[in-house]
Image (tube, rainbow, N blue to C red):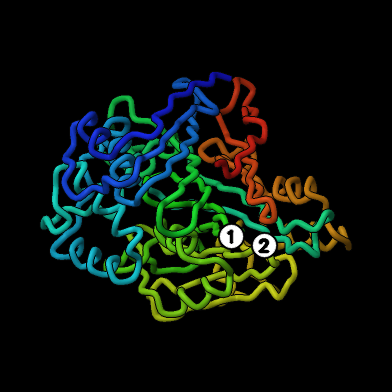
Amino acid sequence: MRRTSRAIVAIPAAAMIALLGGSTSCLSSELKLRFSERTVAGTPSDLMIVRHIRIEGANDQIGARLAEIARDRHGSKGDIATGTLASDQMDWLQSNWPEMAGRAAGVATFLGRKTGDRGFDPTSLSYDMNVRPSCSVVFYPASSVVGGHATLSRNYDFPIGTYSELTGAPTVAGARSMTGDPYVIEMHPDKCFASLYICSYDLLGCVDGINEKGVVVALLADDASPDKKPSYGVGLTELSLPRFVLDRCATAEQARNLLRTAPYHYSFTSCHYMICDASGDSFVWEITPDLKTRYQIDGQGKPQIVTNHLLGKYGVDNLPQGNTFDRFRRLTREIADRKARVTPEEARTINQCVAVPKEANSSATLWHSVYDLAERKVKVSFFLGRDAKGEDRRTPYLPFGFTR
């Protein structure tokens, strides 16, 4: 496995932006950005190149550095939004999520724009585009795990093709798989909680992650609801909701309270979320595709399962047929058959029972992440492709944790 590393340590904000060719206006100067990056898995010949980033500094500095990566590595020129949507979103962020507003300001400054420029949206940094995922997640409170560490086990299942192949958009020469560049990011902002998370599709977003307080969030698509149509508005979206929770919540209960009324819309597909903490508290947050009904399904201190259908609508018993329901039933049986606390290894292997089979040539379990909420650590196995015999090529479980 090839490993490369580069580090930029203690760079003054003004010097950093000058080196990168961006503007220095409005960036924090009293702090020094600390940044390092290494490639932990994959080569250009593999499906994925997985990079680990550690970034510490003011939120606007962090936004500017991520914008530089989006521009220079992924060809981003900044995202767009229709009408006044972008400026309306910035107004909401400044009042309700100032940490993200700071990152957005850094994005705008680096790209030589203003946050109020009509049509320019600095609140996201899309790359490799976005298509609906499907996943399976199990949360085990400490009382259900040998050793007493609350654990979350998550399969991230997704097509392996390019954006053009999956959507019928015009072919782009040399395009990578839509999930060909996942990042494991350890972020230490000057304001709000530090977090360790996996992102793809949007460098300002999050697919699953943990913060320094032991709160974990994992995103899953709602594949079972009919008549899903993208909606547009201010507030949280598919990939920003996990970041919102990790930035601002020290417990699952705080997340419950924040998400009861937080505005939410989706730009591609409706999603729901497992949210849990090291104490064993967990709940699944859901919203119907018409955005009219919200559910918060409590884990009640027991193992909690979620796949790709709304628990608030379908419940957990007498489920219909279909892939998401079949995976839910299988996970329920696997946990029930053990009749006792699971070992950390069992928490890992149970999810393998519902991983995407190798026969599904167009899809794979692109990563399996296992979070130890007590230790604030995660181990992740990434999918690198299939060999000539059709067998999955995966990394070992790579460990990540908070560093100082």
| Residue 267 found in image quarter | bottom left
The residue that disc 2 covers is 278
Q: How crowded is mark 2: few (under 14 residues within 10 Å), some or many (20 or more)?
A: many
Residue drawn at x 58%, y 39% as measured from the top left: 360
Q: Quadrant of the N terminus?
A: top right
Image side of residue 210 versus residue 373, left or right: left
Residue 397 x, y percent position in the rendering: 67, 36
Residue drawn at x 44%, y 34% as measured from the top left: 180
Element assignment for label 1: loop
Residue drawn at x 27%, y 66% as measured from the top left: 94
For the residue marked with disc 1, what is the amino acid? Lys
Q: Nearer the viewer, residue 68 or 48?
A: 68
For the residue marked with disc 2, what is the amino acid? Ala
Which of labels 2 and 1 is toward the front?
1
Q: Please indicate, yes or no, whether residue 322 appears anywhere in the rendered image.
A: no
The residue that disc 1 covers is 213
Q: Which of marks 2 and 1 is nearer the N terminus?
A: 1
Q: Which of 226 and 107 is in front in this view?
A: 107
